[in-house]
Image (spheres, grey):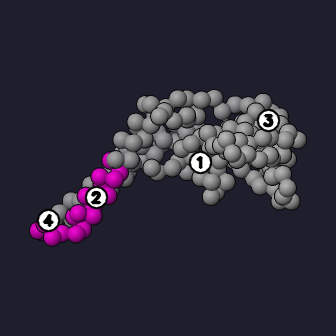
Amino acid sequence: MKDKLTQSDIKKMEEEIEYRKVTLRSQLLEHVKTARAHGDLSENFEYKAAKQEKNRNDSRIRYLERMIRSAIVIDDSSRDDEVGINNTVTVLFDGEDEEEKYKIVTTVRSDSLRGLISIDSPLGKALLKHRIGDRVHVVVDDNISYYVTIKDIDKTTDDSQDKLRAY
């Protein structure tokens, strides 16, 4: 399955790759060399741990590069009065008195515990392209659905705190 990424997602991935290749890789290689110098490698826990950390870093680099190569690049622009990617939406669930805020993001940045809802989730799909005041029908599956009303749309796109998921 190809992931949908915005140019911002790709830029963050490229920055992480650069950091991991230029800065982190040399530090991890130094840790491996230092641990190797401590003697017998068969019983050297520090060497094994350093080697594992280096391998995890290399694996993450390969993963990010593969994601960028295979991604479907999507446009994150939307009209001023409608919900789009990277917008924070305040919704009211039918039958409840409390409002909830969700930021609509791509799948690689989704984290429902932090209110980051994927564009491929039932709620994310339903909210896209709707406006303040719209009552939106959210379909989870054939048996479950609910309604929300859009109360506010924040178009601020500060995504500096959003982290890419580390699969």
Amino acid type assigned to the residue bearing label 1 in the image: Ser
CA distance for labels 1 and 2: 27 Å
Residue at coordinates 80% horizontally, 40% vertically from top-left?
A: 136
Q: Earlier in the sequence, mark 1 or mark 4?
A: 4
* Magenta region, residue range: 38-58
Direction from residue 8 to residue 49 in the image, left or right: left
Direction from residue 132 to residue 12 in the image, left or right: left
Residue at coordinates 85% horizontally, 39% vertically from top-left?
A: 134
Q: Position of residue 118 (x, y in %)?
A: 62, 44
Residue highlighted by disc 2: 52
Nearer mark to the viewer, of 1 and 2:
1
Q: Earlier in the sequence, mark 1 or mark 2?
A: 2
46, 33: nearer the viewer: 46
Amino acid type assigned to the residue bearing label 2 in the image: Gln
Residue highlighted by disc 3: 130
Residue highlighted by disc 1: 110
Quadrant of the image occupied by residue 67: top left
Q: Position of residue 122 (x, y in %)?
A: 67, 42
Q: State the SS at label 4.
A: helix
Q: Is residue 6 visible?
A: yes
